[in-house]
Structures are given as structure tokens and as C-alpha cells.
DNA sequence: CCTGTGCTTGACATCGCTGTCACACTCCGT
DNA sequence: ACGGAGTGTGACAGCGATGTCAAGCACAGG
């Protein structure tokens, strides 16, 4: 099966290849009738331009990179799904890359990878989005970047974010409204800077309600189930056991839930647990988790849109290179009124 | 930052571009000393050939496609992680694509996508791997394919699989050994043909032990949590409630677990539940799920290796185009002795 | 000394497309 | 009628690599 080329189409339409190219790319200066005629031939033959040749001669690119630290988290999967769907629509292709800061050569390896394959843009997810070396690399390579929930360097690149602080505050306020006065908090991966905002929001709500936040009740996790389990066990074994625990993501909240089960503490009767993200997991737990819905799919789609805009040089975007998406509180059965005892 | 080209390297090394190309590609007929000298320059400059140009002139390709039906399942994430890791090593790039059979144009869209971007190979995951139209398409486009757990058309393409039937039988035997005599089974997505083997294995074990399998105890699910929950509820409400339930994947098993919790049925004391896959989820449940570990990561890596082999025309592979990987029974706390009552 | 063979190297065309530029033509105002 | 601006079109070069082929060289055998 010989591939169809521009020349074939041109011959069939009785015009020069360049004219076909103009039609394909929607360039100006083609007579409307001619444009229509050529378009008809293109459709008839089902012609698709070879993306590699295109890229080579125009240094545009149709490949977008999605960079993850850990591509197997539920978070990553959601982002990917959103990005993928949008890519289809805008006819980009998505290249997934995994980067970790282990070892010496990670940056060099990234650079090599980028040099061998020019990307039209890249999406950096936390915690990568806050690594200055990586941002420098993309800047040097002149690859447009959109960051998801960046924690540092605001304004340095386009970004998609959510009001994590506000969301955490609202969720905490909801717990306080349920009568909880002693609330534990399990932080996420310290490298994930945006996640630190969740702690801020929690503290803000507690301070506003004049409730104390003891350091023993503010534990460090790393977003994994295991870390949530361990932190949960410690919190539940404490003398002044909190009546509610806020974990900075759903996986850790699930860990706390299991810790409570093991310890025979009824949820939500004797302990309320809330998470963050509204991952698919949240609904698979028993009781289902109260959490904050972070619109991951939409965030990824917005990121693709931003990249597309930058590629098209839509300076209509101008200064508006940051999209902020709304969150939603999702109160399910893992949280309830504080025990009266 | 101007990109480094073959010519630059050639000039620096005092040879022709073609010779550099030879060194890069490890072709024969270059004097060892020259080869070493050129290699040194390449390393020094950190030169990387432009993959697009390479692809254009040689019609080789360094892009591998990973095709999913649902890219957000835990299964998909595991496969992707394995593929990604192997790609890094072999310096391929991974393009992720999502295909569904909705609507009219899905095949045409796939074809268009493939025509615009020649892939060096593709990995098809279930249930896509059993869609004959898709297999035909790839054959027509002359893109090598490796299928993961194909259900139909054995031998048609290279494949990576696992003994699903044997695994299901062993797991069922383990339940029988625990004293269970009435065991429910929840099937997976009927489109996922390989998964039908799990039912076969289950039936084989039951038959071997002379235990009846009632049709009311063999329900249809679709691999989602929700379908597991619903099937679980039905099984648990039945008059002759089974003492153990085998769900064809972990997500559905989790659904059954929640159904049991809701109904106040203690697991594993009054009901044993087992899943299949050993997804990350399995360990996040309470009690943690007994299941069969399917080596997803290794399977994906093997698939990449197969594609690489095909690309290099290693006919050393010859007829050995199917890799079968081993499973492991993982018995955790969601299964236990049958209740004596 | 000549021819043949095998190794080593580079010149050149080519992959499919787009950027650049030149040319042709139409439509003005003067 | 003529210069100039604005349109429409195609010829041609080149993006950065590899395939092909021919040429140069060394060494063997006749």
C-alpha cells in the first residue's frame, strides 16, 4: 500500500503541490472555487499529510508531551484521559514521558530525548512542574510548557490550576460545622508544592474557628496509600485522638480508613475521614470518601487548549496564560457529626 | 539554540555526514579507529539525530503506539508504566492512543491517525486486540503489532499472554480447599475475550471437584466497580447465597466487598471474596483482596521487546512470537475458611 | 604487472512537505 | 494608458537524515 502524497493529490486536482499545501493548511490566497475543488479531491482520496515531513520542513510539531513523575497514580490516569480526549479533537498526538530525579544523568537524558524529538509543547505535572532545571531545559529548547498546579515560579509558564487553599479551607470548615474540634491532617509529598496549599487552607479554617492545630496532629505523608495507613495508625493511637482526619489526597485517606477499620473504629460514627481529589477510588471505598472534586480531566483538556493556543500564536491569550478551574465539595459517608462522647 | 545536525558533527570530526550516519547506526564498513573518533565527537557534542528526518528518509520509526479502550483503568496504568520503562531503555517514544468503537467513523479516524504518523509498532490491549477490523487495518498499514492477552485469532500477530485459565482454576481450587462449595462468579466485560478464560478455569476447577455451578451464581459484569457492586448485591440477596465470590478483576471484587459491608456480612468470616489482577487497589481494601498477580508491567515490557525484535528484523524470534508470562496466587485476608454453619 | 575482490569513504538524490520568491494577472487612481 | 497595490499560483530550495552507487585503496592470485 503506497502512501498517498501531496503530489498525488496535486496531480489529481490539476494544480501544483504547493497549492494543495495551501488548502490543507488553510492559508490565504487561494481562489474559493479552487480551494473547494482541491478540498474535494483531498476528501475523496482521504489524503493525510505526513506529519513527520511536515514537522521537518516547518518546525511545527503535532506531538505533545505529557510528563509524569509517577504515571501509575490515579491522578496521572485522569489527567491523561483528559489530555488524550482533547488531543483527538485537535488532532495532536500525545507522547507520555516519565521523569524522575534519580541518578546523575536525568536531565541530560531528558535533553537527549527532547532533541531527538521536537515536541510542539509539553505538559508538566506535579511535582515536575516545580523543578527549575526542567523548566530551564524546556525554555532552552524553546518548547512551550503548560504546568498543572504549579507550586512555584508563578507566571513563569502557562498554567492550569485550582484554588487548593480555598478548597481545603471549605472542606475543613465543613468538618468544623459538623462539630469537629480536633482534626488531624496528613500532608502530601513535600515535593508537590501546590499540595502545601492544602495545609494552608486547613490551617486558615482552623485559625478562623479559633481551633488549635497541634503539630502531633499534622503528619507528613507522601500521597501513597501506605503513608496514609501509617500516619493514620499514629494519629489513631495518640492520646488525644482527633475526631476527624483530613488527608491531602484520596489514596492516603483510604489508608486512614483501613487503619480505622483495623483499629475497630467506626467510620463515620467515631471518626470522620476526608480526602482530596475525588479519584475513582473515593467511590470504591466503604464508606465512600468525602473529598474535594478536582476536575483533573478538564484541567488536562484546558492544558492542551493552552498549548494549542500558544502554537497557533494566539496572542489573544496574551496575559491570560493561566486557567483556574473550580472545585466542588463532595460530601459522602466517610464524614459525619463529631461523636458527642 | 540551534539544533545540532549531522553536518555539524561531520565537520567537527572531519568526515562526511554519511560516515557519521554509519557510526550512529552501527553499520559495518567503518574503520575501527575512525568509528571511535567519530563516536567521541558525537558524545562530546551530545548529538542526537533528529528522529523525524530519520523516519522520513528511512521509513523506520521510533514511535510506538499503545492502544487502549479505557486508558484510565488501573490495568492500563500498569501496562503503560511497564511499556514506558522499557521504551526509555531502548530509546523509543510511546504514543498513547484511545480507541472506542462508538460511532461510524472510528476505523477511518484510526486510519487517518496512522497515516499521518507512521508508527514503528503498536501494542493492542484488550478488548481492542480482538477487533478484526483493527487488526486488518494494522496489517494493511504494515505496522507490526503485539497483542496483550489476545482472546481470538491466535498466532495472527505477536502476543504476550498469561495462563488465565490456569490461574483462575488454581484460585478456585484454593477456595475449594478452604471448604467452599457454593461459589459465585462475576464475569468481566464480554468484549474482553481473554477474560472468558477466567470463567473457563473457574468452571474446570468446580467440575473437577464435582461441585455444581448454578447459572444464577454466574453473573455478567463489565470490569467496573459499579458492576461488581450490583452483581455482588444480587448474589448476596439470593436465597442460596454463595460462601465465596470470585470476581474476574479486582475492581469488581472491591464492589462485592462493599456490597458485603453494606449488607453487614463479615469478610472473610461469612463470605470470601477473591479478585484477579493484583491491582494496586487490591492492597488498599479492607480486608486486602486475595487475587492473582498478573505481571502487567513485565507483560508490557515484553511487548516492547517483541516490537523491537520485529523492527530489527530479528528473525531469531522466528516462530517464537508469543511470550507467556507466569502468574502468582496472592492470598490475602479477603478469603478464608468457609463458614461451618 | 594486471585483474579481481573486499573494504572504506563520500557525492548525490531522495523522503514529503513548506518557506520564499518570482511571475502573472486584476483592479485601481491619475 | 500606466504605475502600483493586491491577489493567485507555481518553481525551487531545503528541512536532516539515509539509500544508492561509484570511486579509491589494499591485497591476493594469476
Image (cartoon, coloured by chain):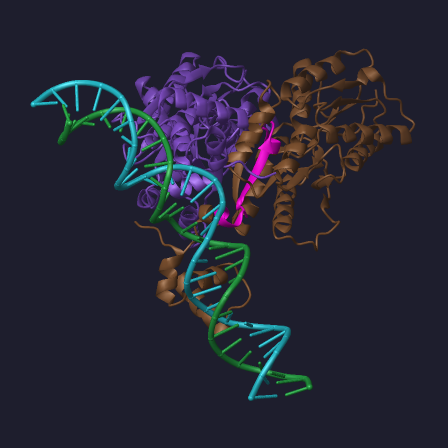
Chain colours: A brown, B purple, C green, D cyan
- On the rendered structure, is B147 left or right of A63? left
Q: Position of residue A118 (x, y in %)?
A: 54, 40
Give the magenta range: A55-76
Question: Is residue B339 depicted above or below B125 in this figure?
Answer: above
Residue appearing at x 39%, y 42% in the figure: B57
Direction right: furthest residue: A210
- On the rendered structure, is A21 left or right of A104? left
Question: Is residue A12 depicted above or below A154 in this figure?
Answer: below
Residue appearing at x 71%, y 17% in the figure: A232
Residue B211 visible from this viewpoint: no
Q: Position of residue A334 (x, y in %)?
A: 70, 29
Between A81 and B83, the residue placed more toward the observer is B83
Residue appearing at x 59%, y 23% in the figure: A106
Q: Position of residue B126 (x, y in %)?
A: 41, 35
Question: Is residue B258 depicted above or below D23 in this figure?
Answer: above
Image quarter in which the C terminus of chain A is found: top right
Image quadrant in which you'd find residue A340: top right
- On the rendered structure, is B283 left or right of B338? right
The mark tally for this picture is 0
Image quadrant in which you'd find residue A7: bottom left
Between B199 and A91, the residue placed more toward the observer is A91
Let me know if residue A72 is in the magenta part.
Answer: yes
Question: Is residue B155 depicted above or below A38 in this figure?
Answer: above
Let me know if residue B277 is in the magenta part.
Answer: no
Between B132 and A54, the residue placed more toward the observer is A54
Q: Position of residue A301 (x, y in %)?
A: 61, 45
- On the rendered structure, is A303 left or right of A193? left
Between B288 and A326, the residue placed more toward the observer is A326
Residue A232 visible from this viewpoint: yes
Amino acid at each position: 500500500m503506497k502512501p498517498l502524497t501531496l503530489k498525488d493529490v496535486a496531480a489529481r486536482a490539476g494544480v501544483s503541490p504547493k497549492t494543495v499545501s495551501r488548502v490543507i493548511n488553510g492559508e490565504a490566497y487561494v481562489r474559493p472555487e479552487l480551494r473547494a475543488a482541491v478540498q474535494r479531491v483531498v476528501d475523496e482520496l482521504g489524503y493525510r499529510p505526513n506529519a513527520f515531513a511536515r514537522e521537518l520542513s516547518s518546525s511545527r510539531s503535532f506531538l505533545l508531551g505529557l510528563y509524569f513523575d509517577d504515571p501509575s497514580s490515579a491522578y496521572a490516569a485522569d489527567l491523561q484521559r483528559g489530555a488524550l480526549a482533547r488531543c483527538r479533537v485537535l488532532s495532536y498526538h500525545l507522547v507520555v514521558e516519565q521523569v524522575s530525579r534519580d541518578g546523575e544523568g536525568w536531565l541530560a537524558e531528558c535533553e537527549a530525548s527532547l532533541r531527538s524529538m521536537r515536541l510542539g509543547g509539553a505538559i508538566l505535572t506535579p511535582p515536575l512542574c516545580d523543578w527549575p532545571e526542567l523548566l530551564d531545559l524546556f525554555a532552552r529548547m524553546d518548547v512551550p510548557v503548560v504546568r498543572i498546579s504549579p507550586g512555584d515560579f508563578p507566571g513563569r509558564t502557562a498554567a492550569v490550576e485550582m484554588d487548593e487553599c480555598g478548597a481545603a479551607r471549605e472542606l475543613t470548615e465543613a468538618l468544623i460545622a459538623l462539630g469537629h474540634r480536633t482534626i488531624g491532617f496528613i500532608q502530601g509529598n513535600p515535593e508537590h508544592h501546590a499540595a502545601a496549599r492544602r495545609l494552608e487552607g486547613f490551617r486558615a479554617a482552623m485559625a478562623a474557628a479559633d481551633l488549635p492545630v497541634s503539630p502531633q496532629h499534622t503528619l507528613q505523608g507522601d500521597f501513597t496509600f501506605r503513608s496514609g495507613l501509617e500516619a493514620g495508625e499514629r494519629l489513631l493511637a495518640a492520646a488525644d485522638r482527633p475526631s476527624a482526619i483530613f488527608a491531602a489526597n484520596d489514596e492516603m485517606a483510604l489508608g486512614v480508613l483501613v487503619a480505622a477499620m483495623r483499629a475497630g473504629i467506626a467510620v463515620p460514627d467515631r471518626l470522620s475521614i476526608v480526602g482530596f481529589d475525588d479519584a475513582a477510588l473515593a467511590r470504591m471505598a466503604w464508606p465512600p470518601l468525602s473529598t474535594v472534586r478536582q476536575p483533573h480531566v478538564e484541567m488536562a483538556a484546558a492544558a492542551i487548549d493552552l498549548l494549542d493556543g500558544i502554537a497557533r500564536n494566539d496572542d489573544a491569550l496574551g496575559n491570560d496564560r493561566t486557567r483556574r478551574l473550580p472545585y466542588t465539595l463532595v460530601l459522602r459517608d466517610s464524614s459525619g457529626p463529631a461523636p458527642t462522647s
